[in-house]
Every structure is written in C-alpha cells, then in structure tokens.
Image: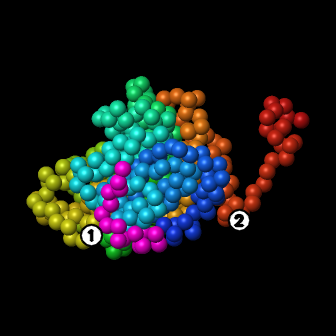
Amino acid sequence: MKSIVRDMSLAPEGHLKIDWVKEHMPVLNRIREEFERTQPFKGLKVAICLHLEAKTAYLAKVVKAGGADVYIAGSNPLSTQDDVCAALVEDGITVFAKHKPDPEEFKQHLIMALEVEPDLIIDDGGDFTTLLHSERPDLIKNIRGGCEETTTGVIRDKALEKSGDLPFPMIAVNDGYCKHLFDNRYGTGQSVWDSINRTTNLVVAGKTVVVVGYGWCGRGVAMRAKGLGAKVIVTEVDSIKAIEAYMDGFEVMPLVEAAKMGDYFIAVTGNQYVIRQEHLEVMKDGAILANAGHFDVEVNKHDLAALSTSKREVRKNIEEYVMKDGRKLYLLAEGRLVNLGAGDGHPAEIMDMTFALQAVSLAYVNEKYKEIGNRIITVPYELDKQVAQLKLEALGIGIDSLTDEQKVYLESWKID
C-alpha cells in the first residue's frame, strides 16, 4: 500500500529531527541492536498509531529493525509533523498521516493502517481497538495483540475487556512503572509548560494555575508550575488524590471556586467536559485554557461556542473566544493535547524509556499472546526493570545489589 504524506521534499528536515532524538535515546539504541540480532518481528506486519513526530519515528525504525513491515498513522491531527513523515517513507516505512487533516481524512488514515491486516499493533488512546471493535471487526482476525500508550486508551481497553469485547491481548504500557513515574510526571510536566510558554510568550511567575486532576500527569504539571513561580490550585474528584495534593503543598478546592481565580487552566483527567459552562461563566478576562489529556473533550468547546459572540485565531495555536459580557478566554491547540498540538511532546530522554517499554512489550506480547488471552495486562515487572537498568547504564550510574544473606532474610518470617 502506498504512503500518504503531504510533501516528500521535506524529508531532509525530518531526517535531521530523527537523527537528533536518536542521539539522546540510548536505551532504545540498545534495544535496536538486540532486535537486529534476534529479529523478533521477522515476517510480521506492525501497525502503529501514535503522535507522529521524531521520537515516534525512531520507535518505528527500531520495530522495523526487528524484522517487521511497519505501517504508521498519527493519533492527533495537530501533532503530526510532515517532515518526519516524509523521512520515514524514505526509510522504508509506510505512512498514512498529514498535519491537520480534516476529520474524515484523519479517520481514513487510521483505517488504512489497519487494512494492511497487521499481526501486532501499538495504539494510542484506544483509537485502533475502538475502531476495530465498532466499525471494522473484519480486520481483527490476524492481530495477535498489541500495546497501549495512554491512560485514556487503557480505560477504553479495560471497558472492552469488562464487557467481553476486547478482541486480542493488550499490554498497558501506560501502567508500567517507567511510564507513569517518569513519562507521565516528568515528561508531561515539562512538555506542557514548554508548549504553553512557547505558544503564549507570557510569564507564569506570579500567576494562578489551576490543575484539573492530580494523577501522575497532574502531579507533573503542578510541580513544574510551582517551579515556574506560580500559585497552584488543584481540583479533584478523588478524595485520596486531593489529600495528596494538599500535603504536596497545593491549594485544593472545587473547580467552580478555582475558576474565579485562575489565569491558566490545565485539564489532565482523561474525562470529558471537566471544564464546562458553569466554570467558563465565572472565569477572569484573559484566562488561558489548555488540555493535557488525550482527546479534545476535556474543555467543553460546545459550551465555549455557545457562550461566545466571536472566535478568532489571535496567534498560532491560540483561539480567542469573546464572551457575551465582553470577557476574552483563550483556548490553546484547539483543546487538543497542548504539549503535542502546540509543541514537540516529551523530551527525548523521557520517551527513550517509554518507547523502550513499547518495543520490549511488543516483543513480549508477540511471544506470549496465546498465554495472555483476550485481556489487558500490566507491563511485566521484569521488562520495567530491564528498561530501568539500561537507563542507569546509559547514565553511568551504578546501584547496590542484595547479598545472598539479605535475600534469605527478606524471604523468611524468622528474625534471628
């Protein structure tokens, strides 16, 4: 099947981007060497749905190095980088993606990646699994299993599993320790603020930042906002997470109260319409709204449109909504993932661990899919440890190990 990209003449710029991240992804480089030797995907087709930028491109090249025919589509219309797509095509990977396609074209690209009848998939937000279950069950038959990148996707796959409709085994890469401890916290924390700062060119210090949701991503966003000098308010629906936010030094209150105080609002829940009419009606003039969840549903754009008299793009990736009372609210990246819709995503060193987990988990599910069955499982602990150890070695950091005597002590109920 022929690739669909916007402009092949952009390939040289894409190669430079991919080469840059490769130099900063030592764990994935080690895994690539192993894959080249063992060929775990020899003769198989792998379909990938991820944010199509340089770090994802290098993951695709690593999977290809393991013997796979790789087909890739973007998981977000704004995060696809056309130069990277062109470079991947030159590297022998089939690409179905363009930056900012219309909604029907975007969906068709996902379908085309599945119409190759893959043996394995890497998914983001459950886009592939949901599409296969709801519209194209005819394309399921060859799929052995796959991996899921995000909290949103894990939620959707678990719902399919609970109803008995998950059609093949999936590994919840998002739930691996090396994913949520580092990617979700440090990656999201940095990349969200990188993107907001470069998009708005406004100061954060002295402002009030409202973080909606205090999961691993919310923790990272709040921590980095505090580091930039902001006053941080956290809103939550989970009482345990709310206490954690309080003990971490943040104010905690209902969103309808925080809405009156915030200068920046960042939704990080994975749920829909968490910022809606009752909050929009009381926000200050000039408030900035951003989403760091998967889909463009956390900020209710229908309510924004209904409450406003006009909308215009005042700066790239900033939409100004003028409310009926004259207030102006600003939505970043169309309410999509701000760190990818208006930026380059997580730092390369962070995605090195996450995509290393993706690569070894994909090899694991290919080997064990019959044993796993049609369910979603957490990343096996030994894979997490493997990636962490490779990262430590790349950093030149050594750690201690237990003595035989200590191992016996920890496994015994006796105390001598």
- From the viewer's side, name the closer residue of 174 and 227: 174
The residue singled out by tag 2 in the image is: 396
**Vertical order, 195 against 279 (above or below):** below
Percent coordinates x, y for residue 111 in the rendering: 32, 44
Left or right of 10 in this view: 351: right
Q: Is residue 125 visible?
A: no
Quadrant of the drawing holding the C terminus: top right
Indicate the amino acid at tag 2.
Gly
Asked whether 138 falls inside the magenta stretch, the response is no
Quarter of the rendering containing residue 287: bottom left
- Secondary structure, mark 2, is loop
Q: Identify which residue is drawn at 27% across, 60% down.
A: 100
Asked whether 7 falls inside the magenta stretch, the response is yes
- Secondary structure, mark 1, is loop
First to last magenta residue range? 1-16
**Vertical order, 340 against 239 (above or below):** below
Percent coordinates x, y for residue 372 in the rendering: 56, 30
Are there few (<14), some (14-19), or many (20+) residues within 10 Å of tag 1? Answer: few
- From the viewer's side, name the closer residue of 276 and 55: 55
Percent coordinates x, y for residue 63 in the rendering: 53, 52
Q: Gap between marks 2 and 1, in whole Å?
A: 41 Å
Indicate the amino acid at tag 1.
Lys
* Among the two numbered marks 2 and 1 on one chain, the one whose residue lies closer to the N terminus: 1
Disc marking residue 316 = 1
Percent coordinates x, y for residue 213 in the rendering: 40, 49
- From the viewer's side, name the closer residue of 315 and 189: 315
